[in-house]
Amino acid sequence: MTANNNMSDMVLTMGTFQIKNVVLSDKNDIVDGTLYVDEHGLIDFIMKDPVIASCKVDLVFPGEKTRILRVVDSVEPRYKPGPAQPFSGQGAPVEQLGYGETYRCANVGVLLSAQIPLRRAGGLHINRETIIDMVGPGAYVNVYPKLMNIVVSVTVHDEFDESQFEQACRFATANAGRYIGLAMKDKTPDTVEVFNMNAPCDPSLPKVVCVYQVHAVGLYYTSYNYGLSYAGLLPTVMHPNEILDGAIFSCNYGCPSTRASTYQHINSPIVRELYARHGKTINFVGVILFRGRFEEMEGKRRVANQVAKIAQILGAQGSVNCWEGEGNAFIETMLTVKQLENRGIKTVLISSELGGNEGKDNPLFYSEPEADAIVSCGSWQRPITLPPVDRVVGAGDHFARLQPENGLIEYDAYKEIKLWQIYEVCESSNKYGLTGWSCDEF
């Protein structure tokens, strides 16, 4: 058997340190499974950005009666020897990712919580409040209650523009992950995985592509590829190793429930699962990255056609489609499924649902008949009651629902919070596989 795919020869060796405890310290180190974080060094490193006005660091562990507020993005500690730094392009020089060695700290999240002033952005383009509960019903719907979380909370100076706030948050998130990741330098990981698409693969196996849709529509709603906003770009072929190695960076602060964090990209269960099946039941031939939520139908048709064309060039016979966002972006999703199916490429779609508070409304606001294989990851329209907590962490001590239609509704963050839908619960109905919700059809 010989290799049979269309991607370049890129091999990524991922070393994992199994972290059992995290301690704030005066150094970055790993000793017997304990990650020591240089607290003051991390704060000083983040505060080098003139936009940042203040910074503090908290640790939050699984099972604590703790609520984390205003998380805008998350990563994990990463270290990469060689010319490329983790999260290339985000406050670090642009270098090729997806090959060589990369080290990661398993079981650890690095969360950036930010109080971002709202002046220029309006309408749907606002930084919405976000909740992560470590216990109760909110603890079953995302990955963070299972992690030891290093919460970096920042505020920003008022004299800067919101686009500068956004960049400061992106760079602070990446810098925190890189700085803490220095603890892995010159150490031996517990386990090593090799991601190599050019490993021997039976040419008779079906070729499968991952169709990977991201948001990139402006301030607080943008994904970055090597530091470049994906807002105006046509679909692009990505090596799956680039996804796992941090080439895609999230700055989607406006859709708490349905967004994908950078943590989700670098730990993509979809990419990992396709890799696990590569050479066994499928031939994984790559990732097609594209932007959703164009404002006109021509833009939506354009990207759907381009995605299907690229899939044909790659020789794909099947595709697994994930997407980010809500209503508008779903049209591109469905049109892409339609184009793929009409060109003979069997497609599976991963999607959240609507359905209303009682689950009696239509689960999808738009569909195409070709979309006949859908994996549900739950509904963000279900109500949820979050119990009282003993501790609140993040940039602020209250929770505010900021909605264009209803204005500002404030809650005491320590008390019970009743939400008429799960929208503000962080990444609770994302379409990238890191969620605890699903639905079954009977």
Image: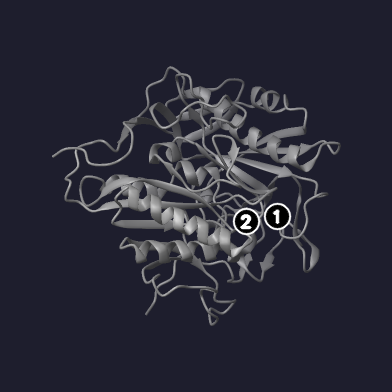
Residues 27 and 185: in front is: 185
The amino acid type, in three-letter code, at marker 2 is: Pro
Quarter of the image with the N terminus is top left
Residues 405 and 224: in front is: 224
Q: Can residue 19 be seen at all in this image of the molecule?
A: no
Q: In the displayed image of the protein, which residue is found farthest to the right? A: 159
Task: Using the numbered discs, state the Cα–Cα distance from disc 1 to disc 2 in whole angstroms.
Answer: 7 Å
Residues 404 and 387: in front is: 404
Residue at x-position 73% and y-position 27%: 49
Q: Is residue 169 above or below residue 92?
A: below
Residues at discs 1 and 2 in contact (Cβ within 8 Å): yes
Q: Can residue 157 be seen at all in this image of the molecule?
A: yes
Is 125 placed left or right of 423 in the picture? right
Q: Which mark is residue 129?
A: 1
Q: Secondary structure at mark 2?
A: loop
Q: Secondary structure at mark 1?
A: loop
Mark positioned earlier in the residue sequence (1 or 2): 1
Is 110 placed left or right of 276 in the picture? right
Q: Which mark is residue 256?
A: 2
Q: In the displayed image of the protein, which residue is found farthest to the top? A: 186
